Amino acid sequence: MSVFSLARLVTAGDRGARIRLAGMAAGVAVGVALLLLLWGAYDALASRAERSTWTTLSAGVSPQQVSDPAAAAPSDDTVLASSTPDYFMGRTITRIDVAASPGSTVAVPGVGRAPLAGTYYASPALAALIDAHPADELGARYGTRAGVIGHAGLASPDSLVVVTGTAAGDLNPSRGGSGADESQFGVWSVAGFGGAAYPNVAYRTVAIIGAIAILLPVLILVGVVTRLGAAERAERFATLRLIGATPRRVADIAAAETGVTSLAGAFAGALSAWLLSPIAARIEVGDGRFFRTDLTVAPFTVIAVVAGVVAVSTAVAWWRTAHAGIGPLGVSREQSERRPAAFAVVPLIAGTTLMLGVTLTSVLGSPLYGVEMLLVLGFLLISLGLVTSGPVLTYWVAHLAARGVRGTAGVIAMNRIRQHPRATFRAVSGLVAAVFMVSVFAAAVTTVTAQSAQADGSDRLAKSTVLAYLATRPTEADAAITQASRVAHTPGVTVAAIGHHHPEEGVVFAASDAARLGLPVPAGADHVQVASDYFEGGPPVVSATAAPDTAPAILLIATDGTASSTERARTAVLRSGVRLALPPATRTELAASALQTTANRYAGLTGLGMLVATIISAVSLAVSTTAAILDRKRVLGLLRLTGMPVSTLRRVILAETALPLATVFALCIGLGFLAAWCVVAGLTEGRRTVSWPDRSYFLALAASLLLAAAAVAGTFRTAHKNTEISVTRYE
Amino acid sequence: MYSVAVDNTTALLGLLGTGASHGYDLKNSYDRWFGMKKPLAFGQVYSTLTRLSRNGWAEMVGEEAGSGPDRKRYGITSAGRGRVQEWMFTPEVPSETLQSNLFAKTIIALLLGDPAGRVLDLQRAQHTAQMRELTREKKGAALETVLTCDYALFHIEADLRWIDLTVSRLSQLRAAVAG
Amino acid sequence: MSEAKVMGSPSLSAAGGSVPLLRARGLRLSFGFTEALRGIHVDVHAGEVMAITGPSGSGKSTLLHVLAGVLVPDHGTVEYKQVRLTALDEAGRSRLRLGEFGFVFQYGQLLPDLSAVDNVTIPLLLAGTKRREALRRAEVWLERLGVAEHSGKLPAQLSGGQAQRVAVARALATEPAVLFADEPTGSLDSLAAENVMLALTEAARATGTTVVLITHDPRTAAYADRELIVRDGQITFGGPTG
């Protein structure tokens, strides 16, 4: 008889066995579906980063910075381009100005041939914005629309991108963004546009660590569900052993059963991932929603994941059964686990030491070769170490606690943990992994949100005032003043004043302009010096000064405060022809854009990762807790029969969950922060660091604990039902 | 154990209780139920009937024409019925002859339509009382006493098991007797 | 007649006299179409050891569960010390079981992760005894049952007889008024069974604990003062007349 038909024989007709297998398949399905979706999301982050980063001109084909675009006319196989940020109603638009020859062969992603001068291609989301607002607020900035940018040039359906055609002479070599991507500055000559999946190796490292972070809870879930009902199964296998099956044969049967079940589960999971991807695509991460195609994992990957999950679960089932010591008379007595050995904490210590060592050498200025890989290795070791050292730590704590406990529930729970430290820790291991990962991400993300724009105040620069930093050449000084006065006539603009560089610090305004801007002007002064800090939202520091003989530095456009007026002012500045150093923006926009980094993209995934990890771990917890009660169904049932209240049973369950969790909870958080600091500081050689995460992290922690509590509370009913007298009586 | 005869006098009287009968029929009836190992001799039947009549438990109820001992029909008297009842509902002291006697009582009770289960329960009570006695005796006793008591206990237990099994088979037995 | 002789036999000697500690009248209980109890009357008197015997499936375990307030009969009443058990709610009966009754089962009643002495402390802790005091008293009971030397062992390290004696110690540790024992020797060999029953009855008699003992084994039943026979959900022997 083949192994498969034997396996079917053993499970068929047994309702309990069928339920157990269904639970196993469902667990595997959930795990695989989440794995594929998250895999897809990570993959999508990379591929959409690749799609959207073509706007980083330095990443193009043979990029060369051009200082005098008027003199370097584009050939047929090169184009001149400049990339600048633009703002509208608080949103950032990526603007690419391209100058191409009439016969240009350089393709712009999502556009094709570069647009003719005076025309533009906008992303669908931007086109919708343009259509929804008057031209003088937005559309007039770009010219005539020639078309819409296709998927290939966009990160997300929500991306705001515009490609405008321009004459080479109109490109401004002194323009730059204010962002952290320094390479954006100026005009570039490229032979083609190209993106990179990761802006640098640091992000690649972060992505790998993120993948581990997702994989771990999923693996734990699969491990937990394939163990479902191990005790019941052992009984059936004992019968097989009695009628003559060899231990190997029994292991084969267990493997066949698990293999077929997890295959079914994995298929169901792959199918649900595919069905759920349109819904998942609606979730906004970083740059916005995903294109559905982004979330679709390549068939090869799906096959690999399904095959991997089936292979691992089957192998584990075989190994576990072969080593469970199922004799012909059953697992005669419930065996206590071996006492966990102290050396199980070694990976944890090694990982921590490695990460700390690598980071410290890096921060101290002599980074080791292959910092990234060493950090990933250290991270892996810590992740592994948390799982391996959990039972040891749990055992130690339970050992200490067993002496101190007073109540019935405490005595039962502590001794249970002492005898089964691995099993009890396994129940919370998913949660432990989740808390660790969440802490890593939450801490790592603080690098991008550590600063924020300064507050508004009556004497501060209004947030509705548009600042246009100028790159006016000495010969253009007079033209700039004319252009500024044109801007001043825009509806909604109250003042448009040019400030000149002060030889030492700050900007010089005419006293009349300063007064109109609401600055405190010292009596009798013709000109005043305003400290630079004012333009970033600082307090006004104004002093009288001599008339400047320097170039214009800034064009300040105060408005009536409405959003439309601000946008009209911005559009007017962009159309005025004034030579800009930075895009016209309010001080808050400038502050925000200074913080824009690719890390933001990963920050968006953090929340998602937290959610998934927590849900998975809650499921694992509920499953394991239920299993732990079912294993002791008879004895707990008899105790209830003798009069033990159900509340004691509940407290037993709670204590068995709370102790292992509490043991490693603080450790997880601490190690999470440490790992985050190591990754961030180690990769940047100490230029960046981490700080306390914001409130959402603590909310997430609280939520995960609540979810865990809910999972445990959910098992109360099962515990109650399975220890009922009617159940115990007919055992 | 089977060589020891049933208390055949009272058993025959009990059989007579099912209705007046000739000696020959009485012997056949006895042999059917209790004579598997050792059938009753004709002479024994007549001597027993004579003895029963002398005790006033049985009487001749008719004599037919012709020769031979089988011309006489015997019936049970009311004193005889009382004797059978007393015998039936008096549990035996656990002994080696018990099984056959108890069996006889059960069959007679079934034949007479008396509660056979009660016969067995009374016997059971007698047995368990003795077991409790022996168990009490064992407490704190010398090892040889304990061993002797154990021996007796196991034998009584064997009887008890037979009783329990017979109780479980009573309805089956009742059908056989009726048939 | 012979009736008089039976009434005078030791089997019924304890039945007469004082108000019974446990008094059940007219118990009826069905599970689906199966009638487990079909009109049972039982009196249990303080201090006696009463055996309930009968073939398997006769309803004797069900009877024990009804007497102990674990199950509620469809009809009939159970009174314990004149309190009507059948009128209490589940919580009330649980409290009563915890405070007044002790239980010994056939097997598998010890928590596998707890040492013998810790197992004995469980009912004491449930009753609110301090852990230290509970441990002290548990040791005393293990001593009384003759298993003091095994107090630190896990149940898996005990023989069947030792485990049952630990279970008896646990049942008696709260000094219950009634000890319900359901086939306490069911999975033991003769000698182990004898040791458990000796220890159980001695300890119970020493503390004046009433014992209700369910068994199908006549030698175990022989440790009782009297015996009830249950057959087909009815008492066929030894019960009160009404």
Image (cartoon, coloured by chain):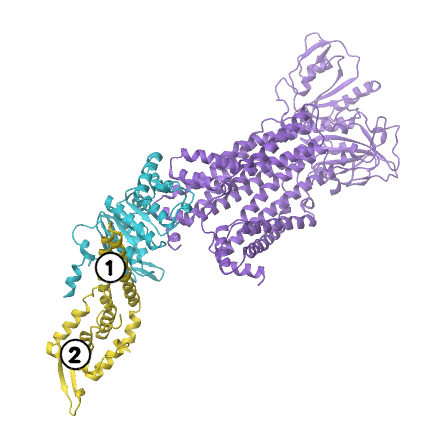
Chain colours: A purple, B yellow, C cyan
Q: Which residue is mark 2?
A: B48
How many neighbours does mark 2 have within 10 angstroms: few (below 14), some (14-19), or many (20 or more)? some
Q: Residue at x 27, y 59 (%)?
A: B153
- Determine the residue located farthest toward the front in the rendered image: B144
How many neighbours does mark 1 have within 10 angstroms: few (below 14), some (14-19), or many (20 or more)? many
Instruction: Describe the element under mark 2 as helix, strand or loop.
Output: helix
The N terminus of chain C sits in image quarter: bottom left
Residue B151 in sight here: yes
What amino acid type is highlighted by mark number 1? Thr
Q: Earlier in the sequence, mark 2 or mark 1?
A: 2
Q: Chain of mark 1?
A: B
Side of A528 where A472 appears, left or right: right
Q: How many marks?
A: 2
Position of residue A573 measured from the top left corner of the image (x, y, whole percent)? 75, 26
Position of residue B88 measured from the top left corner of the image (x, y, whole percent)? 19, 69
Eyeballing the image, is B11 above or below A299?
Answer: below
Instruction: Describe the element under mark 1 as helix, strand or loop.
Output: helix
Separation of disc 2 and disc 1 at Cα? 34 Å
Q: Which residue is mark 1?
A: B128
Question: Which mark is nearer the camera, 2 or 1?
Answer: 2
Corner quadrant of residue C215: bottom left
Position of residue A486 measured from the top left corner of the image (x, y, whole percent)? 77, 23
Position of residue A636 measured from the top left corner of the image (x, y, whole percent)? 40, 46
The C terminus of chain C sits in image quarter: bottom left
Q: Residue at x 78, y 18 (%)?
A: A552
